[in-house]
Image (cartoon, helix red, strand yellow):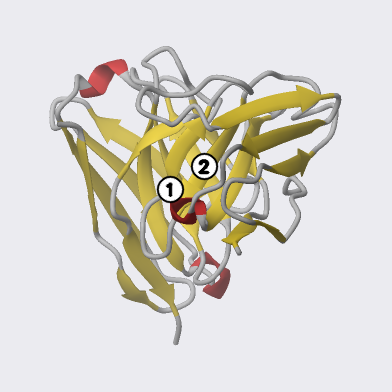
Amino acid sequence: EVQLLESGGGLVQPGGSLRLSCSASGFTFSNYAMGWVRQAPGKGLEWVSSIRGSGDSIYYGDSVQGRFTISRDNSKNTLYLQMNSLRAEDTALYYCARPYSSSFFIRGSFDCWGQGTLVTVSS
Amino acid sequence: QSALTQPASVSGSPGQSITISCTGTSSDVGGHNHVSWYQQHPGEAPKLMIYDVTNRPAGVSSRFSGSKSGNTASLTISGLQAEDEADYYCSSYTSSSTLVFGGGTKVTVL
């Protein structure tokens, strides 16, 4: 069974940093691109970033470009999101997600999602 | 990257068909066949219902279908059921190699 388990969320002050992790199991992690999608409380979905299975191709949404860094450790089956210079508007539930096919990259089509980890940016 | 435009709400009676629209531009919906649709029930993670405009993942009911015309994609739910009441989101690949979501549509079964 495919499972994604996020961790690392919490309360952080504006300007602070946080690193999220997503532990994957039940599939060959290195074969799949992975992504982060967030959802502010009561709001819609927003794509944050995606990384190819090999880790050699990465893209970011405009709102996090230059502040967030996505990475992965295929030996540990783990996806990361380093978040720096956090702002109040970054407050959201952060999901890691896997696309439907190993050949998919930035076309969305996320068919496996974790339960999310909540990040709250507030003083 | 501006969000794709979806109606805030759509409603229908059990057994009816409803259609949710998702309007973008030639740089996203109109220029690529990588439109997906997600269903999200309260407190749950999104569920992929349609990918690449018209394709259903294994296990998704055939009552859900997708289409596209120009810069607008659509999700049709046929034979509406109570369990279909949820929020629905579209997404599209963009020419900037990014992904953009719609604002979401709340479907109410009357």
Report in which chain the residue with disc 1 lies: B
Q: Of the residues under marks 2 and 1, which one precedes in the sequence?
A: 2
Find residue B46 and name its label: 1
Picture quarter containing residue B21? top right
Q: Residue B61: image x %, image y %?
A: 44, 31
The reply, left or right, for residue B58 in relation to residue A78 is right
Q: Residue A64: image x %, image y %?
A: 56, 51
Report in which chain the residue with disc 2 lies: B
Please report the residue visible at 14 percent of the width from the left and 31 percent of the height from the top.
A1
Q: Nearer the viewer, residue B18 or A26?
A: B18
Confirm or deny contact between disc 2 and disc 1 (CB under 8 A). yes
* Element carrying mark 2: strand
Q: Nearer the viewer, residue A99 or B55?
A: B55
Amino acid at dot 1:
Pro
User: With respect to residue A51, does B103 lie above or below?
Assistant: below
User: With respect to residue A106, does A23 lie above or below?
Assistant: below
Residue with the most extreme bottom position: A123
The reply, left or right, for residue B61 in relation to residue A107 is left
Please report the residue visible at 72 percent of the width from the left and 19 percent of the height from the top.
B32
The reply, left or right, for residue A4 in relation to residue B21 is left
Find residue B62 and name its label: none
Q: Residue B89: image x %, image y %?
A: 59, 47
Return the residue at label 2: B38
Please indicate, yes or no, whether residue B98 appears anywhere in the rendered image.
yes
Please indicate, yes or no, whether residue B97 appears anywhere in the rendered image.
no
Rounded to the nearest whole Å, what is the CA distance between mark 2 and mark 1? Answer: 6 Å
Q: Residue B75: image x %, image y %?
A: 65, 36
